Each structure stands twice: as C-alpha cells, then as structure tokens.
Image: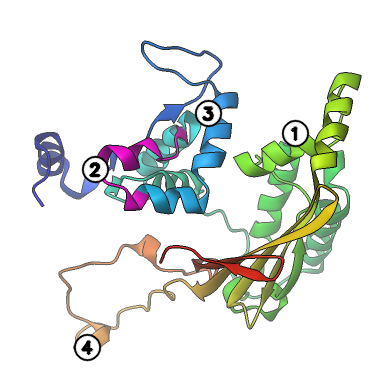
C-alpha cells in the first residue's frame, strides 16, 4: 500500500533509523478540556480499562472505519513518551508503532544490565537472591513500589547466566500476586474498590455497600504443561454467589538465541535475506514468551469469542 506523503518523506530521509508512532487518543495529566480535548489520568485510565478489554477490542477490529476507531482504547501520555524515548535510544527497533499494544510494549523495554557473565555463582550472590525473594514474597507491602521494583530488577540481574527461564521447570506452578509496581488500570480499579487502606468512613461505607454486590476474593496465575499454558483465575462473589472467571492462554518460547555465523556456506548458516531479522527479535536470555489468547471460562462454562 502507498504510504502517506509525510511517512514516505520520513522513510526516504532517515531510512531504517526512524520510528513512526500512531497512537490512539492520548490522555494524561490533571486537566480536563473540550477544545482541545483533554482527558485527565483518572478518567482516561478507567476508559482504557474498559475499552482495553479483549471483547471490546475484538469488536473494534471487526467494525468498519469510524465505528471501529470509536472503540479503540486510549493510551497514557507516559506510555507514548516512554515508547518515543526507547525508540530513540535503540531499545526498540520497530519502524512503526501503530497500535496501543505496540506502544505499551515499546515503552516497557529496559536496557539490559546483567552482573553475571558466566555460569559461576558465589555464595554471596545466592544469599542475596534468597534475601530478595523473601522480601518480595512476604514483605513487599513494607516498601514503596519504587523500592520493590528496584529489588526486582536487582533479582533479575542476579539470575545465573546459565538459567533460561523459558526452559526452566520451576516456572510451572501457581503464582500469587504479591505487589504491582504501577498497577494496570484493571488492577488499580479493583484495589481502589476493595482495599481498606487509609480511607475515611464514607469510603469504607461505600466499599461495604459495593462488596454486597461484587466482592473481589483474589487472583492467581497457574502455569503448567511444561511452560506451555496459563490459567489466570479471578475469584469474586456476585450478590454473595461465588463466581470464578478463568482466562486461558498458551505460551511458546520466542525466537531462540542468534547463532554465531561461521562464515561461508549456504542454508541457515550463511548468506543474506531480503527480510533481515533485528537482534532484538532473538531471545538470547531465554526470558521471552509469545502468548496467545485461548478462551474465557465462567464457572466451568466456556464463553464464545471471535477468532
């Protein structure tokens, strides 16, 4: 397809050194406005939570033109800024970010900062790793989200170089959510509704009234079948009747590590390709999965969904 004039000029000028962002409606900040339209973070995050749900996004993709655009989820200005910075720094090599999902993925990338360079492991490293695991799993609430995130990144850096999590059997099992650094909009909304916190009497009474209608009981994730499947289990009570919602997805390891070229030869070991693969597409650390939506289950009943 023929590109718009502006995009053609950018590609002709910068070739493969450019990245074009095409965000949906951008929200953020504290101000609300009509001309130009502005949505503050609080309202925008709720709209993103609702419109970002899979059934609504599937409907948006199926509807033509303007109708589909009206149901596209907005994106936070901080995510847009993060994607732009990461593209400029070379952390994301995408040439076009034309969806909310692409922008969120690009904004989430962080520079690699590994402290282990070989398979050797000192007793001090193992001791510190065990200490961090204990704090994050049992005492995360005693620390700020920023402190938790810093400890989580330190734990990642202490991972033995020989370990590839995508191939690690220890990944299988039940995972309970201990804390979140920056809650996604759905989690944040749930926490605001159901967590007691330091709310006043009016908010406490409001929560008690809401709990009579919907009472959030918990959420956990189950990884099984040799790291190939995920069940995200959400337990709630609706009008004091237990309801279990299960989101099913399948997992497959991302592209394996790039093999070093030995020069010459044909086949997979040498030559050139018309579709070069960027280094970022290779999973050299064994930390990337591809995840595919497989369905929703409500109290044991599989709900239909678009293909």
Q: Is residue 11 above or below residue 275?
A: above
Which badge, 4 or 1, comes first in the chain's sequence? Answer: 1
| Left or right position of 15 against 138 | left
Q: Which of labels 4 and 1 is toward the front? A: 1
Residue occupying the point 65% across, 58% down: 156
Residues at marks 2 and 3, CA–CA distance in whole angstroms: 29 Å
Q: Which of labels 1 and 2 is toward the front? A: 1
Q: Residues within 10 Å of mark 4 (few under 14, many from 20)?
A: few
Residue occupying the point 24% across, 43% down: 18
Residue occupying the point 82% across, 47% down: 239
For the question of whether residue 198 can be seen, the reply is no
Residues at marks 4 and 1, CA–CA distance in whole angstroms: 56 Å
- Would residue 241 be counted in the magenta stretch? no
| Left or right position of 103 against 180 | left
Residue where numbered disc 4 is placed: 267
Q: Secondary structure at mark 2?
A: loop
Residue where numbered disc 3 is placed: 44
Which badge, 2 or 3, comes first in the chain's sequence? Answer: 2
Q: Secondary structure at mark 3?
A: helix
For the question of whether residue 276 can be seen, the reply is yes
Q: Position of residue 120 (x, y in %)?
A: 68, 74
Using the rendered view, name the quadrant where residue 268 is placed.
bottom left
Using the rendered view, name the quadrant where residue 88 is placed.
top left
Residues at marks 1 and 3, CA–CA distance in whole angstroms: 16 Å
Residue where numbered disc 1 is placed: 192
Q: Secondary structure at mark 1?
A: helix
Q: Is residue 273 above or below residue 16?
A: below
Residues at marks 4 and 2, CA–CA distance in whole angstroms: 31 Å
Q: Which stretch did the figure color magenta?
A: 61-75
């Amino acid at each position: 397809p023929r590109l718009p004039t502006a995009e053609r000029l950018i590609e002709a000028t910068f070739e493969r050194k450019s990245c074009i962002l095409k965000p949906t409606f951008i929200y953020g900040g504290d101000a609300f406005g009509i001309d130009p339209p502005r949505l503050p973070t609080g309202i925008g995050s709720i709209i993103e939570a609702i419109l970002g749900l899979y059934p609504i996004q599937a409907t948006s993709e199926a509807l033509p033109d303007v109708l589909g655009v009206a149901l596209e989820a907005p994106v936070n200005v901080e995510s847009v800024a993060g994607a732009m910075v990461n593209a400029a720094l070379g952390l994301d090599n995408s040439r076009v970010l034309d969806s909310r999902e692409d922008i969120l993925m690009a904004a989430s990338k962080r520079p690699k900062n590994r402290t282990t360079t070989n398979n050797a492991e000192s007793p001090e490293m193992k001791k510190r790793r065990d200490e961090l695991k204990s704090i994050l799993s049992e005492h995360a609430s005693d620390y700020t989200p920023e402190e938790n995130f810093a400890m989580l990144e330190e734990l990642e850096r202490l991972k033995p170089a020989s370990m590839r999590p995508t191939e690690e059997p220890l990944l299988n099992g039940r995972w309970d959510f201990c804390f979140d650094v920056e809650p996604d909009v759905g989690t944040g909304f749930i926490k605001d509704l159901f967590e007691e916190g330091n709310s006043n009497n009016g908010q406490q009474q409001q929560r008690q009234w809401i709990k009579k209608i919907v009472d959030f009981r918990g959420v956990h994730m189950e990884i099984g079948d040799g790291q190939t499947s995920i069940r995200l289990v959400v337990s709630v009570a609706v009008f004091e009747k237990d309801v279990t919602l299960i989101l099913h997805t399948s997992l497959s390891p991302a592209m394996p590590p790039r093999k070093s070229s030995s020069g010459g030869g044909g086949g997979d070991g040498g030559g050139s390709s018309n579709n070069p693969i960027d280094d970022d597409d290779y999973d050299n650390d064994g930390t990337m999965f591809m995840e595919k939506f497989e369905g929703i289950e409500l109290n044991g009943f599989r709900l239909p969904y678009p293909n």
